[in-house]
């Protein structure tokens, strides 16, 4: 047994996974977000809320929110359905993934004297580290796929690049409870099972598992339903192969039926929940927020190359992965022939993925580092990325060293940009060309940077119109009354339209510190906090967003 363990650990890809796991544990303990209430925030509040609602408060109708509005006002963000009932805006897939860690945390809190309310430190600690468990599982399955086509060295370098060279690292540590690391792992498993299925097609048991897994992937993040295209097209490398694949499933509709049945089975609990809260088995909760998809106005250039959130700008290593897709069908030295059958499914998946995500009204996907919605597909993109690495490895020594020098430099650059983001030199959603180059290769933001960032007009974006607000123009248009009171929801003096820059004597770090102090005072004032929450409900935005807006509003005026 000892020799088997030593043999396993001596393999480069296993060593790489172990070292990355230790690095991520170190990062987690460095930021210790669970002690600062920085885990169950933003979208995670909705993903997670099913668990405490069902297993602690025994009330999925969310009536318990009224019992302590001061406590729960910012912890859960429900919407009101046409029946007048409250509903959680997200699907329950993430709660299922969180659940083993939730139960461990609940048992620990109950036995050790922590408040067993679902939101104390043990729960936040458990959620923060749950991602690491799933991510390591995803890397294990991705490793198995890579080793089918590439050498151990290329597989190892690809695993390192996918984690350490992309924003997956950030979302596996600093905002670990978000969906992306989990979806990465699920899709890596789906890819592995798909490759295995086509070794010997026709296994009903494998189709049951693939159908249920595809349904669950979609339950976690509905736009990932296009993963089914990857399955049905896998291995198709010619028109005749495509005709044969279509004919195969037409002749065996029972196989498709089994897969569809188990896909739906994964959604049954969600359908039951929606029926209870809305009267409908399928209920688009995001419709209550406004916005939606604008299929005729996809922001493809913006989502790929804009300075605001462009995928290739903030995760440049993925430009090589995307280009690598087009290497797959060619017979090139270093590329196995078996990869030719990966070209069509990966190309179709990725093009549709880009189109769907760029059609969402908030194509930048809110605050975050880089274009986080693409992280889900990184296991798929690992194959064309590895193809680029493999091709580079077969070049003459001079070019090989130059190529891998660039790859390593981009991995290091990704880590530097994460550092910039953590220090505010890359803004979470207000970047533009001028602001990007103002802080390029700078560890901290400059004074001028705060004058350059621009604010998107969210109300217009919800209608598919993408413009930025000029803060200077807005200030000139303010009424005298706006100077003396915080903006009400929908007012022309809405803080979101006037917050922009630091025009005072404070540096960026002191500025952020003072804004956070103001925000905390607003939260600690019961009357003001209730006013802001009511304003958030009227404006149909999260309470956290409104607290931040008003804190910025007061800061700009030197008040509160």
Image (spheres, rainbow, N blue to C red):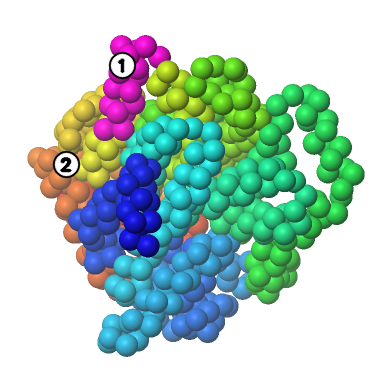
The tag earlier along the polypeptide, 1 or 2, is 1
Can you identify the residue that label 1 sits on? 402
Can residue 521 be seen in this snapshot?
A: yes
Residue 210, given in percent of the width and then of the height, sits at: 67, 54
| The image quarter in which residue 247 lies | top right
* Left or right, 82 with reference to 516: right
**Residue located at (34% from left, 56% from top):** 3
Can you tell which mark lies on residue 508?
A: 2
Residue 532, given in percent of the width and then of the height, sits at: 37, 63
| The image quarter in which residue 276 lies | bottom right
**Residue located at (32% from left, 54% from top):** 6
| The image quarter in which residue 289 lies | bottom right
Assess disc 1: are there few (<14), some (14-19) or many (≥20) residues with their C-alpha within 10 Å of its C-alpha.
few
Q: Looking at the picture, does residue 433 appear above or below residue 274?
A: above
Which segment did they paint magenta? 395-412
**Residue located at (61% from left, 73% from top):** 85
Residue that lies at the very extreme toward the left in this rendered image: 505
* Left or right, 223 with reference to 55: right
């Amino acid at each position: 047994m000892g020799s088997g363990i030593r043999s396993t650990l001596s393999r480069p890809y296993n060593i790489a996974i172990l070292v990355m796991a230790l690095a991520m544990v170190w990062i987690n303990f460095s930021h210790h977000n669970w002690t600062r209430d920085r885990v169950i925030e933003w979208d995670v509040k909705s993903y997670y809320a099913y668990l405490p609602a069902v297993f602690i408060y025994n009330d999925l109708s969310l009536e318990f929110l009224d019992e302590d509005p001061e406590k729960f006002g910012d912890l859960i963000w429900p919407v009101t359905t046409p029946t007048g009932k409250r509903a959680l805006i997200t699907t329950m897939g993430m709660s299922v993934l969180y659940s083993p860690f939730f139960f461990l945390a609940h048992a620990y809190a109950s036995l050790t004297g922590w408040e067993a309310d679902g939101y104390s430190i043990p729960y936040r600690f458990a959620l923060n580290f749950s991602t690491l468990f799933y991510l390591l599982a995803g890397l294990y399955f991705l490793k198995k796929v890579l080793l089918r086509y590439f050498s151990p060295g290329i597989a190892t370098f690809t695993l390192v690049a996918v984690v350490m060279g992309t924003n997956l690292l950030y979302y596996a540590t600093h905002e670990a409870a978000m969906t992306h690391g989990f979806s990465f792992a699920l899709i890596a498993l789906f890819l592995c099972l798909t490759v295995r299925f086509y070794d010997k097609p026709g296994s009903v048991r494998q189709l049951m598992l693939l159908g249920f897994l595809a349904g669950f992937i979609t339950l976690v993040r509905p736009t990932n339903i296009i993963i089914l295209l990857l399955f049905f097209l896998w291995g198709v490398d010619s028109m005749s192969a495509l005709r044969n694949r279509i004919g195969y499933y037409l002749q065996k509709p029972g196989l498709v039926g089994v897969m569809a049945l188990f896909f739906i089975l994964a959604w049954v609990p969600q359908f039951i929940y929606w029926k209870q809260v809305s009267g409908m088995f399928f209920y688009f909760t995001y419709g209550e927020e406004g916005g939606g998809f604008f299929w005729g106005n996809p922001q493809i250039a913006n989502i790929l190359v804009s300075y605001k959130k462009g995928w290739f700008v903030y995760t440049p290593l993925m430009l090589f992965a995307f280009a690598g897709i087009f290497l797959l069908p060619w017979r090139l030295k270093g590329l196995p022939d078996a990869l030719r059958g990966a070209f069509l499914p990966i190309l179709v998946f990725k093009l549709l993925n880009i189109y769907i995500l760029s059609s969402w009204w908030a194509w930048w996907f809110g605050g975050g580092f880089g274009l986080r919605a693409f992280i889900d597909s990184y296991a798929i993109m690992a194959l064309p990325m590895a193809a680029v690495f493999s091709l580079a490895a077969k070049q003459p020594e001079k070019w090989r060293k130059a190529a891998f020098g660039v790859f390593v430099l981009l991995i290091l650059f990704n880590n530097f940009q994460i550092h910039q983001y953590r220090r505010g030199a890359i803004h979470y959603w207000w970047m533009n060309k001028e602001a990007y180059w103002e802080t390029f290769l700078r560890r901290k933001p400059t004074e001028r940077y705060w004058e350059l960032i621009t604010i998107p007009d969210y109300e217009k974006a919800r209608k598919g119109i993408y413009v930025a607000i000029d803060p200077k123009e807005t200030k000139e248009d303010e009424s005298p009354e706006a100077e003396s009171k915080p903006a009400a929801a929908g007012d022309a003096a809405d803080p979101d339209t006037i917050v922009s820059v630091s025009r005072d004597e404070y540096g960026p770090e002191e500025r952020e510190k003072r804004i956070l102090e103001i925000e905390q005072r607003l939260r600690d004032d019961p009357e003001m906090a209730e006013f802001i929450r009511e304003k958030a409900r009227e404006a149909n935005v999260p309470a956290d967003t409104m607290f931040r807006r008003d804190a910025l509003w007061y800061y700009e005026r030197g008040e509160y």
